[in-house]
Image (spheres, helix red, strand yellow):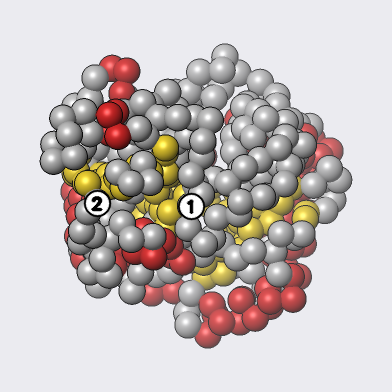
């Protein structure tokens, strides 16, 4: 499994930092090891060589939604932190990596459902990163962290208000502004809202604007914040009366009710029978449609325009589009070139470091990538 997350920085950043690709690896019960079970280890050296050939930094992303179960234990005490530093630097040295992306989802939170948790996770994580930076190898690594929309939970369980220390040990954080609304939500909602301050209180679950404001207020400089953007959307089974309350020729509802007991199958990348998750819980299809999947699925034309017979709307508040097939009753909240351009303008006007896309393989003929790059002013 290859992760194709990519980011572009603002103008003036050295060319060697223009793009950063990451390969995922997972934390393991033994702090001295990391699991590459879901990655192609044999291709890792080729991945690094190809990145370096094109003047691109190669990073391994440690953790992820299913791979961060043991982060808390790995940084919980001095002995484990020292061992984990050696594990990380050993991985970087063995594969000639330029850096590490820490994708802990999430400190002081059970995440997928069975993550180890400690009230002092955030403080322990910072202590670990300081020790890593003090290491001869670690001092030279490019270190990043993928984060929740709002700051990590402190010992009280609330979003931390002082994370200034992370700005001196991380090169940047990437706010994962996606999965804000999904099949777990009370209603349909935008997967990756740019803004939600214009929505009602019950419809404010998080957004790029709110997330950036919160992380910056907690001590992370704007030029050390990267905005995470998605190349996919979530699908919902929505009855026609709820999606189109004024009839098939009327406007598409923004936050309609949906049938949570029936998850539509997504595009060809979706697995209808994925088996149990790492916590042992049964799983069904995720129902995700990548941008190219919306074209394959008949929601969009190749040029990005909505296909004939598909209801659609563009939400001016969240700056995201929605499509609905009233025959199959499948509703999808996604991102298109217009919403990516809006995010690009936000990156430029706010002075953010750049963007990180999950994932570039979701795009179709670079439609989304080209839109956000152009709007953000990247050459």
Dividing the picture into quadrants, the one containing residue 338 is bottom left
Q: Residue at position x 71%, y 37% from top?
A: 282
Q: Nearer the viewer, mark 1 or mark 2?
A: 2
Q: Residue furthest top?
A: 156
Residue 50 location, x and y as percent?
56, 82
User: Quadrant where the C terminus lies?
Assistant: bottom left
Let me know if residue 172 appears in the view: no
Tell me: 93 left or right of 204: right
Q: Earlier in the sequence, mark 1 or mark 2?
A: 1
Q: In front: 370, or 10?
A: 370
Helix, strand or loop status at disc 2: loop
Residue 213 lies, with reference to residue 299, above or below; the image says above
User: Quadrant where the N terminus lies?
Assistant: bottom right
Q: Residue at position x 42%, y 44% from top?
A: 234
Q: Which residue is mark 1?
A: 266
Q: Residue furthest bottom?
A: 53
Residue 271 location, x and y as percent?
60, 54
Residue contact between numbered discs 1 and 2, judged by CB atoms under 8 Å: no
Q: Which residue is mark 2?
A: 310
Dividing the picture into quadrants, the one containing residue 72 is top right
């Amino acid at each position: 499994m290859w992760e194709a997350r990519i980011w572009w920085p603002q103008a003036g950043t050295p060319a060697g930092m223009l793009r950063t690709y990451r390969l995922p690896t997972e934390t393991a019960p033994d702090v001295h090891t990391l699991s590459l079970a879901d990655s192609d280890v044999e291709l890792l050296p080729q991945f690094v060589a190809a990145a370096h050939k094109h003047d691109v930094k190669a990073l391994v992303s440690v953790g992820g939604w299913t791979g961060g179960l043991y982060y808390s234990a790995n940084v919980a005490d001095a002995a484990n932190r020292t061992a984990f530093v050696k594990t990380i630097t050993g991985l970087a040295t063995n594969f000639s990596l330029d850096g590490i992306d820490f994708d802990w989802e999430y400190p002081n939170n059970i995440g997928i459902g069975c993550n180890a948790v400690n009230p002092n996770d955030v403080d322990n994580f910072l202590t670990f990163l300081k020790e890593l930076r003090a290491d001869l190898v670690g001092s030279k690594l490019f270190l990043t962290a993928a984060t929740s929309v709002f700051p990590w939970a402190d010992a009280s369980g609330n979003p931390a208000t002082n994370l200034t220390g992370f700005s001196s040990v991380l090169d940047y954080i990437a706010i994962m502004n996606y999965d804000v609304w999904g099949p777990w939500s009370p209603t349909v909602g935008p997967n990756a809202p740019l803004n939600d301050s214009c929505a009602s209180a019950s419809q404010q679950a998080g957004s790029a604007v709110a997330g950036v404001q919160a992380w910056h207020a907690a001590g992370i400089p704007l030029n050390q914040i990267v905005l995470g953007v998605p190349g996919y959307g979530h699908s919902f089974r929505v009855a026609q009366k709820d999606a189109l309350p004024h009839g098939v020729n009327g406007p598409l509802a923004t936050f309609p009710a949906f049938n949570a007991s029936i998850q539509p199958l997504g595009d060809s990348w979706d697995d209808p029978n994925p088996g149990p998750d790492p916590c042992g819980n049964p799983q069904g299809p995720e129902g995700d449609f990548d941008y190219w999947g919306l074209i394959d699925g008949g929601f969009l034309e190749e040029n990005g325009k909505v296909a004939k017979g598909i209801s659609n709307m563009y939400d001016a508040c969240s700056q995201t589009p929605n499509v609905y097939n009233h025959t199959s009753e499948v509703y999808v909240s996604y991102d298109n070139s217009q919403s990516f351009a809006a995010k690009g303008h936000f990156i430029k006007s706010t002075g953010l470091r750049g963007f990180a896309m999950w994932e570039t393989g979701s795009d179709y003929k670079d439609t989304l990538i080209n839109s956000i790059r152009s709007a953000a002013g990247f050459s």
